[in-house]
Image (cartoon, rainbow, N blue to C red):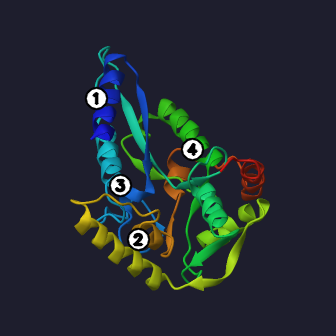
Amino acid sequence: MCELSGTLNVIRACLRQNVTRLLYCSSVDVVIGFEPIRGGGEDDTPVPPKFLFPGYPESKLQGERLVLSAHGQPCDNGEKLHTLSLRANVMYGELDPYYVTTGFRNAASMGGKLIQVGNGEALFQQCYVGNSAAAFVQADAALAEKPNVGGQAFFIPDDTPLQNSFKFLEPFLESRGFSLSQTYIPYSLVYWSLYVTEMVLKALSPLVKLHLKTASCSIQYINMDLYFRSEKARSVFGFTPVYSPAEAKERSLAYYKSVKL
């Protein structure tokens, strides 16, 4: 895989060029299977028997393991390489091309309304991109001062309030003149319709290549509780979100109001 070969190349380059710190951007997806996660921590949230998403989490997990296993390896000059991994949440804010912006595009294609799927009760955790970036800066500083914090993986959610994904999107949608649908489509109806369609397309794949815009796993992703704790990152390397939820929302609104779709 490109992810693995690229990660190995970076590790080898660090050892050859005497780079003593390496931080890996992992993802919470490396622990997400088909069951809800409520307040997951590093020590009580294992890798699932099967990932919810195909491909991406597996390559991310393997990359994370490569980087963490390189912790303590000697560089060419005899100094040691120190590594850690930060498991980023789904991010919103400046330069977001996929998350909130996909909601905009879906709403635009449906006459200005984003269709809500599910009962609206599932809690999903998103993180402002500025706070995710701050976590890397803070972790790097801590790793330079205290190399023993290395060799570990950390969850880094900020203080963005836990909300249903659709309610989270609502103020951003309204900033562009869009809105949420007043009614919900049952989750099971959408999920199983997509799942059966995926199976049919898979069976037909030797003859014709067709792809759905939305996958059944994506619908499940936003319809089960998924949130994590940041206590370990805060206590071990001093993670402190730089932007409050209000500041994050204000900065994000400024971006989303003008982003091209």
User: Looking at the image, which residue sits at the far left?
Assistant: 206
User: Looking at the image, which residue sits at the far front?
Assistant: 207
Disc marking residue 135: 4
The residue type indicated by label 1 comes to Gln
Spatial distance from mark 1 to mark 4, Cα to Cα? 24 Å
Residue located 58% across and 47% down the image? 132
Q: Which of the two residues, 7 or 230, is positioned nearer the viewer here?
A: 7
Task: From the top left corner, tell me how far across and down residue 98 is, in percent.
Answer: 56, 53
| Helix, strand or loop for disc 1 | loop
Q: Is residue 97 visible?
A: yes
Quadrant in which the N terminus is drawn:
top left
Spatial distance from mark 1 to mark 3, Cα to Cα? 26 Å
Query: Which is nearer the N-term, disc 4 or disc 2?
Result: 4
Q: Nearer the viewer, mark 1 or mark 3?
A: 3
- The residue carrying mark 1 is 73
Query: Which is nearer the N-term, disc 1 or disc 4?
Result: 1
The residue type indicated by label 2 comes to Ser
Residue located 78% across and 53% down the image? 250
Q: Is residue 49 visible?
A: no
Query: Which is nearer the N-term, disc 4 or disc 3?
Result: 3
